[in-house]
Amino acid sequence: MHSLRAKIAVAYLSLAALVVGLSAVALFELAQIEDKVREGSKISELFDATLEMRRFEKNHFLYGQASDLVEHAYFVDRAREFLRRDAVVINALAGTGAAARLASDLARYADAMATHARAPDDEALAAAARALGTRIVTVGENLALRERRSVDLALQAHQRNFLIFLAAIALILVVTGVLLAHLVTRPLKAMENRMEAVASGRLTRLAPDSADREIVSLTAAFNHVLDELAHRQHTLVRSEKLASLGTLLSGVAHELNNPLSNISSSAQILKEETSIDPDFRAQLVEDIDAETLRARRIVRALLNYSGDRAFEPSCVPLAELVEETLLFLKDKRPANVEVCLEIAPGLTLHADRPRLQQVLLNLIVNAYAAMGECGTLTLGAQQLRVGDKGDDFPVPCGGCRAGDLAVEISVTDTGSGIPPDLLERIFDPFFTTKAIGHGSGLGLFVAFEIIEEHDGCLVAANCHDGGARFRIRLPVDPRELP
């Protein structure tokens, strides 16, 4: 039964069948109690007739009136009629033959009263009649008591069975609820938790926790949406890279113009001056060659940055990479912003150079934008051992375990800082504090993804004296150590 709808329908029909069955049993028991009450009324009629019969018997013995004998005979006849009518009920209560024995006693009693009427002064006949009357009343009373006890027992049994039925229904409801929660609610709750993870930016495909058609279909549809989101996110990430590339191009164009101008000037001199000193000519040729190499390095850096290539870590001189990035962003730097470098010249790390440069580019551009027209941008880097005294990195670093060496890069600005309530969200995709049309919300997300790709961590915090500080920690490959 691989369908939520079928399971719910079966559970509902089972409960409905149970309720109908228990209701039928309860109605059957009530019908039996009704029969017993009806039988009890018949026994009560017989018992009342015997009591009336005894009452007129006593009146006759006391007053000797003929009318009492007539009434007495009337109730004797009624008692006989009840005995004939309810013989089956009486036998069921007092045993087989009880009705016949009672009818025999009643006949003897009627004869004794008739004999006493002919000889009213015979005390022996009166005593015999009284004894028979007492015996008949006692039997009637016992029958009435047994009938009342039978009704009471039936009512108690019905009450007990009703409570058992209620307990059974409650138990079955609980079991059904638990089963439905296990079969229906649990996979839906698991899917809800995974959707919350997706909402937080982790596009992880769902694995169906249930074989039910509805869950499988919902999971497949959700995974399709995730695939589309991943594709669109990849497209947007590429567009973000192109936007960064545009920022880089403006700086590259300016930097490329300098070696081209130098090459052009040297070539113009060689062209116009026919009689030139050989040493000067050699110097001009050497300058042209040097500027050509310089232009080639700039173009190669641009191609490496813009190319859609696989992740290829290598030994990267950090100070050189930072200076090159700052050079490309020279025209983005506000006039009154000072840049301080605190990086040892020989510090290297194992990383994918273009990707790490994209991270630095995004962080530096954001810092320039945060400071406005004036401020100080500090770029620092140091090698440290994870977990040493004074290590205040706020989160565990991916590939940097306690005791391992790591390189920490910091980008600190003196801007207005990050609102505290937004600190936890700044690395989410498409989240931006900039005005509409001035940011895609992917720059920091892409930077975070690149650092995670390097098995490192990227965190942000506000400085005590104002501004924001981004810290990158990357593991040191033992192969890169001297």
Image (tube, rainbow, N blue to C red):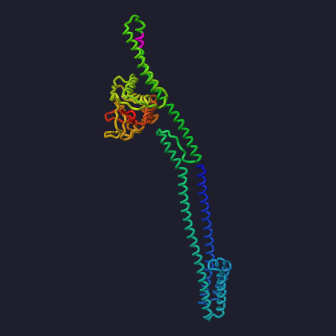
Out of 351 and 122, give the one closest to the viewer.
351
The vertical placement of 76 against 220, above or below, is below
Out of 278 and 314, give the one closest to the viewer.
278
Out of 346 and 427, give the one closest to the viewer.
346
Tell me if residue 173 is in the magenta stretch: no
Residue at 40% in and 23% down: 328
Residue at 55% in and 68% down: 160
The vertical placement of 156 against 412, above or below, is below
Residue farthest toward the top in the current orientation of the protein: 275
Residue at 35% in and 30% down: 347
Corner quadrant of residue 388: top left
Out of 398 and 87, give the one closest to the viewer.
398
Residue 16 coordinates in the image, percent (x, y): 60, 57
Which region is colored magenta? Answer: 263-267
Q: How many marks?
A: 0
The answer to whether residue 348 of the structure is visible from this angle is yes
In which quadrant is the C terminus drawn? top left
Residue at 59% in and 83% down: 138
Corner quadrant of residue 44: bottom right
What type of secondary structure mainly makes up the magenta span? helix
The answer to whether residue 417 of the structure is visible from this angle is no
Would residue 11 appear left or right of 367 to someone viewing this image? right
Tell me if residue 266 is in the magenta stretch: yes
Residue 275 coordinates in the image, percent (x, y): 39, 4
